[in-house]
Image (cartoon, rainbow, N blue to C red):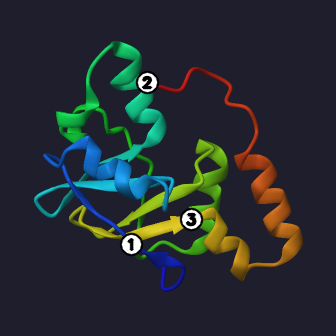
Amino acid sequence: MRLLVRIVVLLAALAAIAAAGMYLHLRRSLPVLEGDQLAGMITDRDIVVRAIAQGKDPRGMPVREVASRELVTVNADDDLSNALEKMESQQVRRLPVVDEENRLVGVLAQADVALEVKEKAVGEMVEEISKSPTGPRL
């Protein structure tokens, strides 16, 4: 995948949730690394569901305690059609892009794809990704 991949902010697994909060208003999700390996992704929803709703104080908690660890990723060598199929089937708007050793290369976002591909295909992709989930998502 040679285009549409970028990283704005990375978080170490031990970084405080407060640090994530400073950047989540810019990006909807942030990659979490343990060493040089992708360990998870964190969203504002993760903080609410796994910390605040549980009565925990997120200010001093490390992001690894609330980050999503079951990730859908694509390989850096995959083609865009494979990535789009994963976005549709898994109903995700952002896909971490990793190399063969699970090191983060970047993030492919639905919005970035929309800027690059034909209008009709984008509309269909957005519709599929935005469908209501069929099961619980935690």
Mark 2 or mark 1, earlier in chain? 1
Amino acid type, residue under disc 1 in the picture: Ile
Q: Please state which amino acid type lies under the numbered disc 3.
A: Ala
**Camera-nearest residue between 90 and 131:** 131
Image x and y of residue 132, in percent: 73, 32
Label 3 sits on a secondary structure element that is: strand
Label 1 vs 3, first from the N-terminus: 1
Q: Where residue 27 appears, x then y in whole percent?
A: 49, 60
User: Could you tell me which residue is drawn at 64 percent across and 57 percent down?
Assistant: 85
Which label belongs to residue 113? none
User: Which mark is in front, 3 or 2?
Assistant: 2
Q: Evaluate if marks 1 and 3 touch, with contact meaning CB atoms under 8 Å apart.
A: no
Name the residue that disc number 2 marks.
Answer: 49
Of residues 58 and 67, the one drawn nearer to the viewer in this rendering: 58
Position of residue 64 measured from the top left corner of the image (x, y, whole percent): 22, 39
Which residue is most to the bottom?
2
User: Vertical placement of 5 versus 90: above or below?
Assistant: below
Disc on res. 109: 3
Other residues around mark 1 within 10 Å, as few (<14) / some (14–19) / many (≥20): some
